[in-house]
Amino acid sequence: MKDAKCKICRRAGKKLFLKGEKCFLPKCPMIKKAYPPGNIKKRRRRNFSEYGKELREKQKLRNWYGLGEKQFSNYVKDVLEKTRRTSSVEQNPAEVLIKRLEIRLDNVIFRLGFAANRNQARQMVSHGHFLINEKRVDIPSFHLEKGDKITIRSSSQAKELFQKLKISLKKYEAPNWLDLDKNKLQATVIGFPTLEEVAPPAEISSIFEFYSR
């Protein structure tokens, strides 16, 4: 449906920027209809249970990254399992989860400004437009490492999809953990994001509680 992504934001009660630049326009439904979708007459205020709050936070983050339930739950459960197996408190589980989600190839393509949103980035990766360390990778969930170099395939740069990319990147600033060369349209992973830098739209602790039930 045309407004399906907008309904996700309205249901979450928060802008998740699922449609890229369109989310900044005055016509954005979250500006004109900042309330949950559905019949207004039948809508009533309700107090969420603890489970309901946790579910809502989980949905926010899952939709923000555009992941299916199984894929998202696998990320969370893996972090929870490793947390249980170790007594180390050096790493914040929330930080670990966000890092894993952020270093997915589709998310990095979005963070570099090569795509308007994560959904488009996922399609671009699936169509094989990118090289990682000179090797073609078409798996959106591919996890990048520090030092990895991302380039656009020479055969893809001539496509209309990338024709105006240099112009759109002129005023764009990539995260400081990504070194972006706007002229060569290539980038290198020089670090990893922190929880504060990413500023996810959900309460991560509630998400862990949801999957710990």
Image (cartoon, helix red, strand yellow):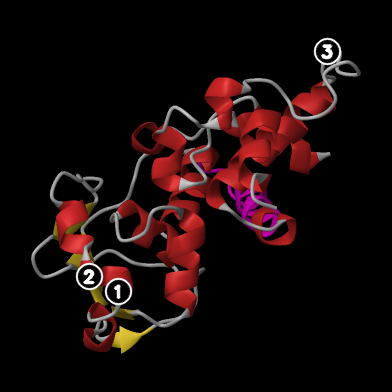
Q: Is residue 46 above or below residue 102?
A: above
Q: Residues within 10 Å of mark 2 (few under 14, many from 20)?
A: few
Residue 85 drawn at (x, y percent): 64, 52
Query: In terms of secondary structure, what is the magenta stretch mainly?
Result: helix
The C terminus lies in quadrant = top right
Residue type at numbered disc 2: Gln
The first of marks 3 and 2 along the sequence is 3
* Residue with the most extreme left position: 183
Point out the stretch of residues depicted in magenta: 73-88
Q: Is residue 78 magenta?
A: yes
Residue bearing the label numbered 2 = 163
Task: Check residue 47 in the rendering and tell me which mark sits there, or answer none.
Answer: 3
Whether residues under marks 1 and 2 lie with C-beta atoms below 8 angstroms apart, the answer is yes
Does residue 123 show up? yes
Q: Residues within 10 Å of mark 3 (few under 14, many from 20)?
A: few
Residue bearing the label numbered 1 = 160
Residue shown at the point (20%, 46%) measured from the top left: 172
Observer-nearest residue: 18 or 191?
18
- Secondary structure state at the residue bearing disc 2: helix
